Image (cartoon, rainbow, N blue to C red):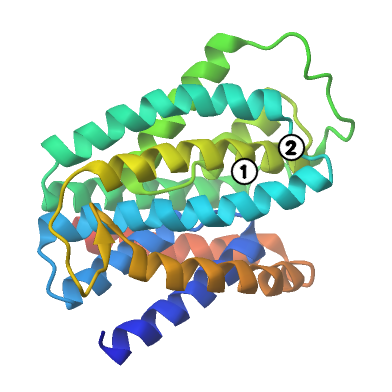
Amino acid sequence: MDLIIILSLVILGMFIGFISGLLGIGGGFILVPILIYLFDFMGVSDDISVKMAVGTSLFVIFLTSIAGAHKHSLNKNVIWKYSLILGLFGILGSIVGVKVVVDYLSGNLHKVLFGIFLILISLNIIYSNFKDKNNLDMINNIINTCHNINYKNVGIMGFLTGFLSSIFGIGGGIIVVPFLNIFLKFPIKSAIGTSLGMMTIISLTGLLGYMINPYPFDYNLYNIGYVSLFAGLIVAPIAMIFSKYGAKIAYKTKSEILRNILSIILMIVGIKMVI
């Protein structure tokens, strides 16, 4: 394997881990476009590079979400009842999403849709910085999770998250955390922990979906189906290590500044993919 690719994957793991710890996000929407460019550089065709990037991203997210969910569970921040409900409905969404990607989406259309998705995320981040800063932390007591579950709304959110996760290779936390925090009034730490619990279920389903879809073995990718184990096993461990450094910096930097920087990066990448 070309040394340049290996070094690029190491740097990517460091960056994804740092950004994840810094902003509390999974990083899939950053990881996927970079993997697409790396796979293109390696000579993988457009139709395959996008699918391979999404599948590999889900592999990385699965490994990192297990570690994150475990840490949050030790601190009693994972409300597993909600994680399971979101995850079970998310499995259905993941199955549908994988089917759509593998059978119906061309590489170019997939890139355009992902670019639009990045632009929407960028705009949402910018918008969130203008909202009342107290909205996300206005609830400080753990809610009673044993009653009054709106199965319909939670199920729809789980399905939508699983669908988008399997199409774009994201963990879904960027969708579920605001939903749990704002609409169901979860404390922000419980929302993040519960989201991570859900992500382990949804990302595993999407990951297996991309693995079982046949694609010839490539010694450069060391792949199973549309998942590059080579890339994933380099990025994931490094990302888990460097996430703690991002978390340390987060305490010293205004979140609005960090989110504005991220939104600019996502906007540029999104526009480039659409064009």
Left or right, 261 with reference to 144: left
Residue 134 visible somewhere in the drawing = no
Spatial distance from mark 1 to mark 2, Cα to Cα? 8 Å
Q: Residues within 10 Å of mark 2 (few under 14, many from 20)?
A: many
Say which of 125 and 197 sits in front.
197
Q: Amino acid at mark 1?
A: Leu
- Point out which mark residue 78 bears: 2
- Point out which mark residue 196 bears: 1
- Point out which mark residue 134 bears: none
Viewport quadrant of the C terminus: bottom left
- Mark 2 falls on what kind of element? loop
Residue 11 visible somewhere in the drawing = yes
Which quarter of the figure has residue 146? top right
Left or right, 268 with reference to 44: right
- Mark 1 falls on what kind of element? helix
The image position of residue 230, as x and y in percent, is 35, 70
Residue occupying image coordinates x 55% and y 43%: 173
The image position of residue 4, as x and y in percent, is 31, 89
Q: Amino acid at mark 2?
A: Val
Which quarter of the figure has residue 46? bottom left
Which quarter of the figure has residue 84? top right
Residue 113 versus residue 253 in the image, above or below:
above
- Callout 1 touching callout 2 (CB < 8 Å): yes
Say which of 226 and 161 sits in front.
226
Viewport quadrant of the N terminus: bottom left
Left or right, 109 with reference to 98: left
